[in-house]
């Protein structure tokens, strides 16, 4: 699995809220189809056709992503099923690799 694939699984599982780098979250937002629509200082504003919400991302000191912004990206990804095209069949199935629980993926 690629590094971006691993980051996507960590994002969806909720295990990365406190430990995801901003550059990884930025790359995931782009991979999920969001365009960096506007930039004001350190803020990055993302938009995507078919998604009513916008994402406002800003790095924390040390290059880390803010936990509430990681959660926002996860919630929007799940609500609009944006990650589905990037998950392998094994990751989509209810198998040993990951098990869906309350619309989140949990690694076992």
Image: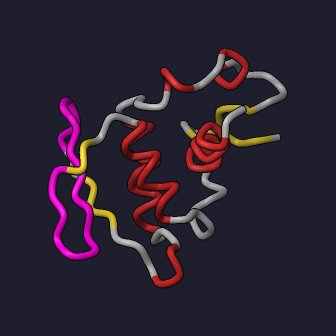
Please give left or right for residue 79 compared with residue 16 in the image: left
Give the x, y percent position of residue 29: 39, 46
Q: Is residue 105 left or right of residue 46?
A: right
Tell me what residue is drawn at x 48 percent, y 68 percent: 65
- Looking at this view, name the residue that lies furthest to the bottom: 61
Say if 104 sits above or below 97 in the image: below
Q: Nearer the viewer, residue 60 or 54?
A: 60
Q: Can you give x and y, in whole percent of width and height, for residue 63 in the image? A: 50, 74
Front position in the image: 5 or 51: 5
On the rendered structure, is 18 left or right of 48?
A: right
The percent position of residue 98, horizontal first and vertical second, equals 74, 33
The residue drawn where x is 40% and y is 36% is: 32
As drawn, 69 above or below 36: below
Give the residue drawn at x 22%, y 38%: 48
Q: Is residue 102 above or below residue 19?
A: above
Q: Looking at the image, how many numbered discs can be counted on the residues?
A: 0
Residue 43 in magenta stretch = yes
Q: Is residue 106 left or right of residue 69?
A: right
Quadrant housing residue 76: top left
Which corner quadrant of the image does residue 15 belong to? bottom right
Nearer-the-camera pick, 41 or 50 = 41
Give the quadrant of the C terminus.
top right
Q: Position of residue 30 (x, y in %)?
A: 37, 42
Q: Which residues are magenta?
A: 37-52
The verdict on residue 38 being magenta is yes
Residue extending farthest top: 89
């Amino acid at each position: 699995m690629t590094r971006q694939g691993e980051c996507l699984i960590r994002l969806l599982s909720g295990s990365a809220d406190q430990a995801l780098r901003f550059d990884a979250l930025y790359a995931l937002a782009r991979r999920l189809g969001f365009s960096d629509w506007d930039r004001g200082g350190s803020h990055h504003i993302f938009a995507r056709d078919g998604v009513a919400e916008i994402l406002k991302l800003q790095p924390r000191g040390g290059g880390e992503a803010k936990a509430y912004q990681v959660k926002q990206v996860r919630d929007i990804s799940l609500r609009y099923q944006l990650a589905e095209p990037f998950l392998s069949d094994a990751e989509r199935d209810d198998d040993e690799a990951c098990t869906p629980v309350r619309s989140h993926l949990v690694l076992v």
